[in-house]
Image (cartoon, helix red, strand yellow):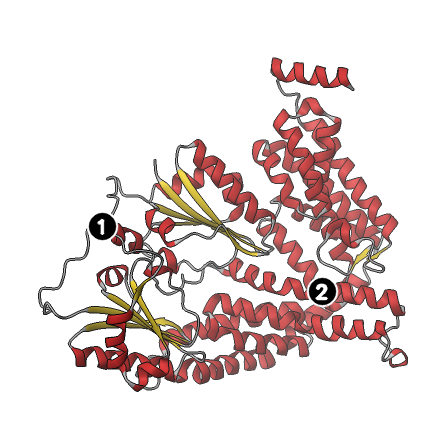
Amino acid sequence: MSRIVAITACPTGVAHTLMAAEALRKTAAAMGHEIQVETRGAEGARHVLSAEDIAAADVVVIAADIQVDTSRFAGKPIYATRSSDAITKTRAVLEAALALLPAASPTPASAPTAPDVAATPAAKRLVGITSCPTGIAHTFMAAEGLRKGAEQLGHQIKVETQGSVGAQNTLTAEEIAAADVVVIAADTKIDLSRFVGKPVYSTSTKAAIHDGAAVIATALNQARVHGGAPASGADLTARVAAAKAARSASASGPYKHLMTGVSYMLPFVVAGGLLIALAFAFGGIFVYEDANKGTLGWALFQIGGPSAFALMAPILAGFIAYSIADRPGLAPGMIGGMLAASSGAGFLGGIIAGFIAGYSVAWLNRMLNLPPTLAGLKPVLILPLLGASITGLLMIYVVGGPVSAALAALTTWLQAMESSGAVVLGLILGGMMAFDMGGPVNKSAYAFATGLLASQVFTPMAAVMAAGMTPPLGLALATWLFKDRFSGEEREAGKAAAVLGISFITEGAIPFAARDPLRVIPAIMAGSAVAGALSMLFGCTLQAPHGGVFVLPIPNAVGNLPMYLVAILAGTLVTAGMLFTLKRPVAVSAETATTEATRTATA
């Protein structure tokens, strides 16, 4: 039996995150392994892994579609995959993760690090962390103060600096395990999970700068064990060995970077779209004109349109760059996004600006090696200046014009689209939404429609949401109408699928598709394509990029609401009909047949 810890996360932080976690738990239990799963959802982290959990684990599974910090797991075998794979190919994911383990059974805990024979018996080993709000001068001056103070008292110390460009001189698990005391000289919050069971002393950077020797002496006398009583040597080593901090995992590909940007952008688009809809409800379609200035409708429009929607491209670009280059990429990315918005390049320009800023800043950060005395200038002066300059100049002279023209042409084409063209686009977007049910193809269609909201093009968004609702709704209807096509477990799952469907959570169809992909996926793609095509044909519009049926009652949130409901209903019926045609009756056990007969007789 192996011990596994895992993290699941997806851009929206809802369905894929929770379904991947549940699939990993059930499959690991069936395989005879122990697993603990931390979920990174819309409400933050749940079931957070402790230092003890990580230390006791044999392998780590990261099932995520956005960037996840893996510094807590340094020294542990890590298997990274997408959340959709963890849902549909759970056993294969766990087997691939366990294959990373060495052939020989790992020992429960490594032996404590042997003491350095060169050190004098009276000498102590210390480790420290320094950090200040700006991550520049005080961070490095405090580190230098601690080093000199320890040297003056005859002790050894290694200091990790947590500055604006990330952690430097990172403490290893072996160094933490061998340390007698941990000194934290910081003016910001420091994660102490690595130091469970170690004596920890906390103070300010100012104290370390002013008298490092006094801080060291006080730490040796007053440090208190963090996280409970000290453990025995072997147990302590095991608990801290896997919790070392290292720099964040390297950027993991364009898809994850894009989805990180989309996940941060989404709340702005949702809030902005619904506020605009409410503004129209209170003040009419011309609420934005000066004649209505000062009214509630006008105020809501100002919040939703010129404010919330104006931040869409900068947020998208900024967090794409952040995903690639960490904090130094945020400012150049957001500046590039502002230029994209002001030049008319919109969300397409924002995506390009984010990748330009992120990769250029990441490259500059690697290439520029400055002496310690100048290192503080790098995150607040050099990287923002050079990154913003490179991104801005490329956006103004190279990217902005062509992308703006392309977006304008796309917008004009969509707005003037004939019915036949609208049907084709709806078929394509609908099929994409159902193809992988929350995977890269689904998210590509969703990002395309969401991005067009800022260009006042609302029909693709309506088609995408209708197409995303029909897979679980069609499956729920089929499990109710055609019970002989589904097992008892699937019929029970159909009830939950209905709730997920009306909430626009396409992932509700995944358990069914995973069990019978060759029949279920074509059926739900057909239904989604019909829903998307009819929505486009009827000219339905949607101002909010999420919410399912819960946004339908909001005035003006949906254009041509009656026909929009028809499109969703038609897609649901097509899905259910296709399932009846493609699926074959399943064998029913005697116990199940008896239960069904009893229910029928009771009814």
Q: Quadrant of the N terminus?
A: top left
Q: Nearer the viewer, residue 171 or 422?
A: 171
Residue 198, position in %: x, y? Answer: 29, 61
- Give the Cα separation between the discs numbered 1 and 2: 53 Å
Q: Name the residue under label 2.
A: 271
> Outermost residue toward the front?
222
Type of amino acid under label 2? Ala
Question: Few, some or many C-alpha atoms within 10 Å of disc 1 (few <14, some 14-19, many ≥20)?
Answer: some
Q: Which of 119 and 211 is in front in this view?
A: 211
At 73% from the left edge and 67% from the top edge, which residue is drawn?
272
Q: Earlier in the sequence, mark 1 or mark 2?
A: 1
Which residue is depicted at the point 51% across and 44% down? Answer: 21
Relative to residue 459, is residue 404 depicted above or below?
below
Q: Residue at x 46, y 70 (%)?
A: 325
**Marks 1,2: beta carbons within 8 A:** no
Q: Position of residue 71 (x, y in %)?
A: 38, 60
Q: Which of marks 1 and 2 is in front?
A: 1
The residue beneath circle 1 is 234
**Disc 2 crowd, CA 10 A, few/some/many (<14, 14-19, 20+):** some
Q: Can residue 158 be seen in this view?
A: yes
Left or right: 291 with respect to 485? right
Position of the C terminus by quadrant: top right
Which element carries disc 1, helix, strand or loop? helix
Res 228 quadrant in image:
bottom left
Left or right placement of residue 382 versus residue 338 in this view: left
Which residue is at a point 63% across and 25% down the rendered structure image? 488
Would you place residue 518 above or below residue 319 in this image?
above
Asked if one can make out residue 375 in the rendered structure from this viewpoint, the answer is: no
